[in-house]
Image (cartoon, helix red, strand yellow):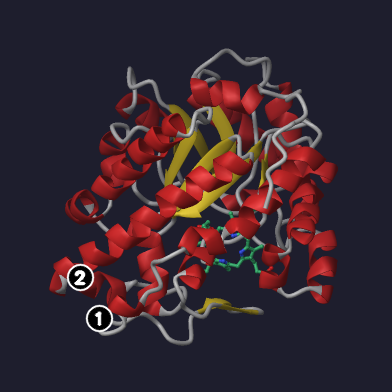
Amino acid sequence: MSINKDFPLLKNERLLKAARGEKVDKLPVWIMRQAGRYLPEFREYRKQHDFFEICNNPEYACEVTLMPIRRYELDAAIIFSDILVIPQALGLDVEMRPGVGPVLPEPLTLETLSNLNTKGTVKKLEYVGQAINLTRHKLEGNVPLFGFTGAPWTLMGYMIEGGGSKTYSKAKKWLYAHPQKSHELLEILTQVIIDYLVMQIEYGAQIVQVFDSNAEYLNKNLYSIFCLPYLKKISLEVRKKLREKKLEEVPMVLFAKGGWYCLEEQAELGYEVLGVDWTVEPKYVRNILKNKNITIQGNLDPCALYSSKSDLNSQVEKMLNEFGSDRYIVNLGHGIYPDAPIDSLKTVVDVVHSFEV
Ligand code: 1CP
């Protein structure tokens, strides 16, 4: 499959500038899960198409990616896909059940670990690259396009639990009882993630985010052993491979949800941007990360969108004042909920863009 690299000129560089630590005219804002069920047009589209059918078809994925961009003045698009396409490409079945979320009917076990299909995995994910390539063109340079992946530990969690979980105790059991097997799995995932991100960038992703949504179930000790080394390898190897392929480097974002217990360590992993959730105070974050050359992304509570317009206004303003406009990308502290009022997002974007930097 050929890659059309004759990309349109980027007209809004605000987000990439903030990621690189350069001055911006206005604060950049995007929203995790901005292409999702809170949008009536997305719900309508989902009536006609299965979740993974959208992911698999570059034209469908592109259409859904553009939905929030047409409706709001967001400063970035994020390609429509899911972190679970990696376990799928490794040979596990993943179903998206309405009202439940992702389900892996046959979760990974110690016995089936060696059955994972590790050959040609990224080739199987090239449809994501094609969706990225098409979308980058269709965006006409209006905003940059995010690629993304799940982090090794977060993917390991879904693969072993067979879906979302309240405790991730089955996956954590591996960490305590089977550390060698855990490392084996994390290493397999890390290798796929590296090549997957490089592929996304080659096809046109202008920035990439690593979602470690399940960091909150670990602690500093476990995160140091089972996450930090792999996250570092990902940032180093992606950049090395980009240089080897003579591709331009892009900023990398790490969002370790609930990973406040090792924020300082995250700053040493080679990511330009660190995402934080709403449970940490902006001042705490800025203080831990001062002089580290790190851009912060976050961290409005997704539930703040249920506030009245004037309350939401003041909460966003307070957050902007506390983070300050230096090296800051505005986002929620996690993905937007399906029942979020659609007007609230406009309020957030308006407050952010009228904030004096
Ligand atoms: O707009 C965007 O942000 C792009 C699309 C996107 C992204 C970045 C989707 C579409 N999923 C993701 C990432 C993703 N998927 C993460 C990391 C971010 C996060 O922590 O929220 C995770 C953990 C998943 C796994 C997943 N997929 C869940 C969570 C399950 C659980 O209990 O932990 C769910 C509910 C999904 C389904 C899903 N993915 C995306 C959408 C729009 C949906 C809703 C399903 C539907 O429309 O039927």
Circles 2 and 1: CB atoms closer than 8 Å? yes
Instruction: Identify the residue at horizontal 41%, vertical 57% (top origin).
Output: 192
Around disc 2, counting alpha carbons within 10 Å, would you say few (fewer than 14), some (14 to 19), or many (20 or more)?
some
> Where 144 sits versus 114, above or below?
above
The reply, left or right, for residue 210 in relation to residue 136 is left
Task: Give how far across and how far down residue 51 sits, in percent.
Answer: 69, 71
Task: Give how far across and how far down residue 278 sits, in percent.
Answer: 48, 45
The reply, left or right, for residue 349 in relation to residue 27 is right
The picture quadrant where one finds residue 240 is top left
> Where 289 sits versus 88, above or below?
above
The picture quadrant where one finds residue 272 is top left
Q: What element carries label 1?
A: loop
Q: Quadrant of the C terminus?
A: top right
Earlier in the chain: of badge 2 and badge 1, it is 1
State whether residue 253 appears in this view: yes
Task: Give how far across and how far down residue 239 sits, in percent.
Answer: 41, 33
Q: Given the image, on which type of amino acid does mark 1 rest?
A: Leu
Viewer-side residue, 114 vs 267: 114
Instruction: Identify the residue at horizontal 48%, vertical 81% (top origin).
Output: 104
> Where 146 sits versus 11, above or below?
below
Q: Given the image, on which type of amino acid does mark 2 rest?
A: Lys
Instruction: Identify the residue at horizontal 54%, vertical 49% (top origin).
Output: 148
Q: Is mark 2 on a helix, strand or loop?
A: helix
Question: Between marks 2 and 1, how big is the CA–CA gap?
Answer: 7 Å
Viewer-side residue, 171 vs 199: 199
Residue pointed to by mark 1: 110
Residue pointed to by mark 2: 181
Task: Give how far across and how far down residue 164 sits, in percent.
Answer: 46, 73
Viewer-side residue, 150 vs 246: 246
Instruction: Identify the residue at horizontal 63%, vertical 56% (top origin).
Output: 128
Queried on whether the Cβ of the residue with tag 2 lies below 8 angstroms from ligand 1, the answer reads no
